[in-house]
Amino acid sequence: MTTFYQSQLAILLFTCAIFVLLQRYLLRKALQHGPRQEHAIGPAVVTKLTRQYLWVYGLAMGADWLQGPYVYSIYQEQYGLSERMVALLFVLGFLTAGVAAPAVGVWADQYGRKRMCMIFCVTYSCACAIIQIPSLPVLFLGRLLGGFSTAILFSCFESWLVSSANILSLPSRDLSTILGHASFVNSITATAAGVLSNKLVEYSSSYSSPFLASGALLLLNLVVIWASWNENHGGASASVQELFNVRRLSKAWSVVCSDRRLFVLGLIQTCFEGSMYIFVFLWVPFLQEAAPSDQTLPLGYIFSCFMLSMTLGALLYNCIISFSHSTSPTDPSSHDHTVTLHAKFSSAVCTASALAFVLSISTESEHKRFWSFCAFEACVGMYYPVQGMLRGKLVPDEHRATLSSLFRVPLNVFVVVSLMAGVASARHFVLVVCAILLLLTALVTAASLLGRAKSPPLASQRAQ
């Protein structure tokens, strides 16, 4: 069984290498023949921002991915918890992330995105240390810290990048390229993390060793952020006494109410990322269900295959963007062109993800399920830069982290309800529901964003 997954890993590596060469060719072609921008920022500025962000983002995601293959296994197989209790631990993490999300966004906008990212490194490393203790109350505490850290990870890092790009007046092409590179780095980091975690478990005979390595990476990242990032904020600061800053939250909510496209962004994030997090919980038992009972799945290699698939998705996004820049008769950095292109991307990604889930449900073959999950991960690789660009164009900078965090509230509610509904006993039903929601999201995105692409960009407005 291990030989099969090692061969699939090699095939995916070879395919990624081909796409890397194709991406470089298309990028050179875009630079030679694409429309020129009158006020382009110097390449040294773009390169510096790219390196600042990618080093930090790669370390943060690498620390997160090191834990990925064995979160389920350490709870159930090493500590002997029931699948229902494991689901409850997952639910606690998502609930914490949902409750903390509004406060995290406000704190990041008010007190600084760099500061919140440094806090993430501290809290998540503490969670990695706590999971070493096989005591249920302590494990619950670890999930609380992990949920709070996740709320920071998926809102503050991107907010720092987009805000920094706006401060430097970077054109959309450069921001799109950085986000595409970030998705690529995320995928490569995750692939390496999967192999490393597998080796750590083999050598230590313990599922807890990847978490120790993750904690070490987080402490290293803390130093990198402190040394290399500049601080940036959102709008004017509010009263320190207002812990959750209700006034600021209501102001951000009024921005959402002023443009239904922001509701659509929230819908995309809820349905796609909700399906993704449910998949994180489901893929191990789903493949175990189809595998021979006398064989153990090489989870690290499978995880690395998934991450290489995500790399392919990120490379495909970069190739299409580069091709669009070289052939578009209009300015590829214009608001209308960027929103239209990425709205089409978003609809296609949601549709393809739904089809991948349908295929996994309709077969009992372990290998077919594996490849359908690889297809879904490729969609994940495309989703992150697409959603990041849509947020960058449509969300006002003053409330960027606040709105990114607010969008995570329905996301976490969706995941919690799905897990509490009985994922263990209704895996197929849950994936069917996810597929239906993804198809509906694709339709709503096409109707709302494509139909209103020419509306004024809220990201260029300032809150009154």
Image: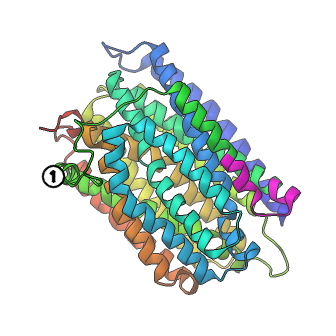
Image position of 425 (left or right of 320): right
Residue at position x 44%, y 70% in the image: 415
When asked about the image quadrant of residue 296, the answer is: bottom right
Q: Position of residue 390 (x, y in %)?
A: 33, 43
Q: How many marks?
A: 1
Residue at the outermost right position:
203
Q: At 38% from the left edge and 39% from the top edge, which residue is drawn?
A: 159
Asked which quadrant contains residue 453, the reply is top left
354 to the left or right of 20:
left
Q: Which of the pair 457/373 is nearer the observer? A: 457
* Left or right: 262 as drawn, with respect to 91: left
Residue type at numbered disc 1: Ser
Position above or below: 266 against 143: above
Q: Main secondary structure of the magenta part?
A: helix
Please tell me which residue lies in front, 61 or 109.
109
Q: Name the residue that disc number 1 marks.
A: 254
Disc 1 is placed on an element classified as: helix
Can residue 207 be found in the magenta stretch?
yes
Location of residue 88 (image quadrant): bottom right
Q: Horizontal and vertical percent for residue 134?
A: 71, 71
Magenta part of the protein: which range? 200-215
